[in-house]
Amino acid sequence: MRQLKSLSLLLAAIVLTSAVQAQVINGDLNHNDGLDVEDVTLLIDGYLSGETEQIQAGGEPYGIDNSLVSGTWYRTKTDKFTLEADGTTDYGTGYTYQFMPLQGTILFYNAAGDAVAYLKVLYVPADKSRLVVKAPGTDDVWTYYDTFVQRVESITLSATQLSLDLDGYEKLTATVLPSDAENLSVVWISSDESVVTVSQKGLVEAVGEGTAIITCTAADGSGVK
């Protein structure tokens, strides 16, 4: 039999959700969501979609509408913050904030009124069920939810590299943590099914020569891979 090159298995943590593509952010970050694009209510890095008149009501280019992001946002049980519509927040001691939709920015002020921090808002659906933000100057993207649900925090595979003969196969297992996450199911994908296929039970089979990446993604919308 012909020997295949190694098959690399990628583990990563990025923000994704299932279903149809809704937006392209900054031209390089795909955000997927089951909502129609017309349901998107916020400016996303310079491109306005959805409720244009509502967003522009505060004036441009620096109009303020805190109601679009107000609420308590949970990433984990302890990683949370509240944005009140009146501009008060527990994001920092004595902090206030302003949300500028046309800039897609939450700007935070300390007790002395000095601007001390900000978050870039990438996405929020019309029902405000989650808030996707990016820390300036980094590639970190975080999704916060309007209610706390224990989501998947890590996935570890039984192997991170395989070398298979043609028509050979191997079963991969995924350890999903924490064990009390509400949804422990995962989705398996091969980057090149002409090289390897993978079943939804993690069975990898070599069908052609080459290299492929097998990705195991949490099905709960946490984005953990």
Image (cartoon, helix red, strand yellow):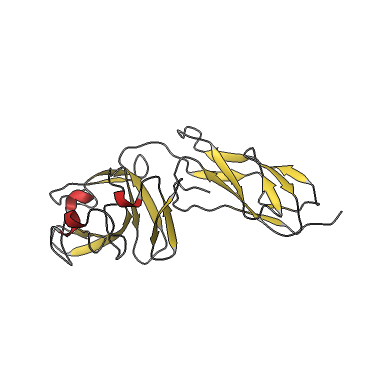
At horizontal 38% and vertical 61% (from top left) the residue drawn is 25
Looking at the image, residue 79 sits to the left or right of residue 180; the answer is left
Q: Which residue occupies the extreme right position in the image?
A: 1
Q: Residue 97, can we see it?
A: no
How many numbered marks appear? Answer: 0
At horizontal 13% and vertical 59% (from top left) the residue drawn is 58
Looking at the image, residue 102 sits to the left or right of residue 75; the answer is left
Query: In this orientation, which residue lies closer to the viewer: 200 or 94?
Result: 200
At horizontal 34% and vertical 47% (from top left) the residue drawn is 144
Query: In this orientation, which residue lies closer to the viewer: 202 or 72?
Result: 202
158 over 102 or under it: above or below: above
The x, y position of residue 17, in whole percent, is: 44, 47
The x, y position of residue 151, in whole percent, is: 44, 39
Q: Residue 84, can we see it?
A: yes
Residue 109, quarter of the rendered image: bottom left
123 over 198 or under it: above or below: below
